[in-house]
Amino acid sequence: MKENFQELKEKFNEIKNLGWVKSTSHGNGNVGLTFETLLGKERENFPVADYKGIEIKTSIEYYSRPYITLFSSSPDGKYIFQTNILKEKYGKKDNTLKNSKKFYARITGNKFKKINNYYMKLNINYKNKKIILEIYDLNFNLIDNDCFWDFSSIQEKIKKKMKYLAYITAQKRYTYKEVEFKYTNIEFYKIKDLNKFLNLLSKGIIKICFKVGIHKKGIKKGIKKGKTYDHGTGFEIKKEHIFMLYEKI
């Protein structure tokens, strides 16, 4: 692994020496996608680390977006389309498409969060080795705990994708009709362990974020309008807290 760190560091320095580079994509993740393009890496959605066992996370200096998504993981829990069920049962009606619902929620393990007309909280159940999403009515009566993640699933995610981390910072500027980045620093980290991950989850440092919405515009003559899209169920942490989960190499 040491050789992989050194190789990525050398490639980073080559990219850093380019100075300002034009963004190769659009949207919130363009700083990371641009770096991966310069690295020669094709865009993919495989549940493995980005570069030879090393996950790459990029952050724009002085940028207000606070959260970093560690990884995405669909629930294990007893229904196949669990997030869609959450949307239909506990989601909010869309303002435009009145017959459709959306479900956006960031939920923690240290306190109840009111989502629409319900309270939600994570239960880190060590006895059954599950992270359980508990849903309560407004009188705090438990009404649903079907959505969960097995500890083994999280351990596998950590092993395959998040064991080693390259944390890269960059600057951003706008030129005429374009966005440009300049990559400034890289540091390497190793995750502590599953117990630390679960501890931070129970304290609300790591959160679970649902982003289940609907297509507002017709695509291919309206085929997708009103259909569900799921941006993935992300395990998130604030930038300033990521070093509670990792130790610097």
Image: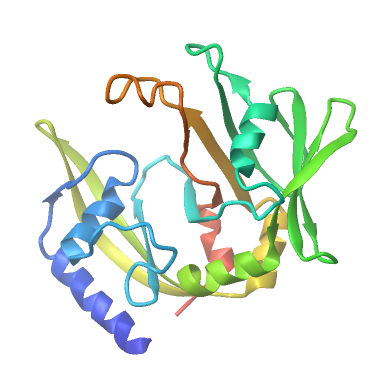
Residue 154, placed above or below residue 159: above
Q: Nearer the viewer, residue 136 or 70?
A: 136
Query: Is residue 42 rendered to the left or right of residue 104?
Result: left
Residue 47 in the image, given as x and y percentages of width and height: 44, 63
Residue 178 in the image, given as x and y percentages of width and height: 13, 36
Q: Is residue 150 left or right of residue 211?
A: right
Q: Quadrant of residue 105?
A: top right
In the rendered picture of this protein, how many numbered marks are placed on residues? 0
Q: Is residue 85 above or below residue 99?
A: below
> Residue shown at 71%/63% (left/top)?
199
Q: Residue 100: x, y in percent?
A: 55, 19
Image quadrant of residue 249?
bottom left
Please tell me whether residue 246 is drawn above or below residue 118 in the rendered image: below
Q: Is there any visible trace of residue 128 in the rendered image?
A: yes
Q: Residue at x 56, y 57 (%)?
A: 241
Residue at 20%, 49% in the rendered image = 181
Residue 67 in picture, x, y percent from top left: 49, 47
Residue appearing at x 29%, y 65% in the figure: 185
Q: How is the image coloured?
A: rainbow
Q: Quadrant of the N terminus?
A: bottom left
